[in-house]
Amino acid sequence: MTAPAPSAAAPRPTELSGRRLAARAPARRDAVRAEAAGYPVLIVAGLNNSGPGHWQSHWQRALPAAERVEQADWGRPDLDAWLQRLALAVERRPGALLVAHSLGCILAAHLALRPQALQVAGALLVAPADVDTHGPAGRLVESSGPAPRRRLPFPTTVVASRNDPYMSYPTATRLAQDWGGTLVDLGAAGHVNVESGHGPWPEGLALLGQLARRTASPALSPLHEL
């Protein structure tokens, strides 16, 4: 069962091609780093966390002001407990960019109902997990549903794959629309993780840089290629 379509009055998301974005990125796989001063980035991982080879872990090591939102039990998502950890992290790092993957994207969307959402500069939401349909992860992710269907109060980029086993592309498109985000179509990119061949993923860092330039937060510095 797919999630219900939004009302006809809802605006359509801006859609970008992942191939077109990759073509803009430098051919060399240099890391795109944040300036050391004043660029908070919060890594929001999903079910079972992101291992050392995952692009989120690569970025955490590469970005000087990045930190991961740690959860007490990565294998058993508890929406209230996970959301509280995220809210506290945002309070500590006002003006942060959220970099979320899979179930972490849904967690970031749930934050929109809390006052801490006003302290978020923007969010890069990569390969959201479908918490409204029984899928490969089963009830572990369904406990975080239903997925929020309101416009998020911060600039958002939703990155989706056309063969993601954890969310169909049409469902991701509707979420991007509901959230008021820019939709990036990666084509057939699996779940955008280690298994799908996404290690350091410099093209994703380029998307983070584009998101940073869209924000109006004075706490952020531009991303630079080194």
Image: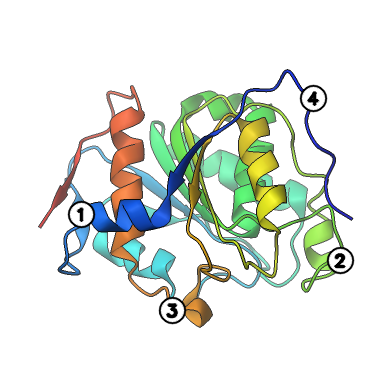
For label 3, count other residues whose C-alpha is less than 10 Å away and answer few (under 14), some (14-19) or many (20+).
Answer: some
Total residue callouts: 4
In the image, taking residue 64 as reference, residue 53 lies left or right, namely right
Q: Which mark is residue 139?
A: 2
Tell me the residue that label 3 is attached to.
Answer: 197
Residue 84 shows in this picture: no
**Distance between mark 3 and mark 1 Cα atoms:** 21 Å
What residue lies at 44% left-to-right and 79% top-to-bottom?
197
Three-letter amino acid code at disc 4?
Answer: Ser
**Distance between mark 2 and mark 1 Cα atoms:** 37 Å
Residue 2 shows in this picture: yes
Of the residues under marks 1 and 4, which one precedes in the sequence? Answer: 4
Q: Nearer the viewer, mark 3 or mark 1?
A: 3
Tell me the residue that label 1 is attached to.
Answer: 33
Q: Nearer the viewer, mark 2 or mark 4?
A: 4
**On screen, 47 above or below 35?**
below
Of the residues under marks 3 and 1, which one precedes in the sequence? Answer: 1
What residue lies at 42% left-to-right and 73% top-to-bottom?
198
Q: Quadrant of residue 129?
A: bottom right
**Distance between mark 2 and mark 4 Cα atoms:** 28 Å
Of the residues under marks 3 and 2, which one precedes in the sequence? Answer: 2
Q: Secondary structure at mark 4?
A: loop
Q: Which mark is residue 20?
A: none
Of the residues under marks 3 and 4, which one precedes in the sequence? Answer: 4
Tell me the residue that label 4 is attached to.
Answer: 7
Three-letter amino acid code at disc 3?
Answer: Gly
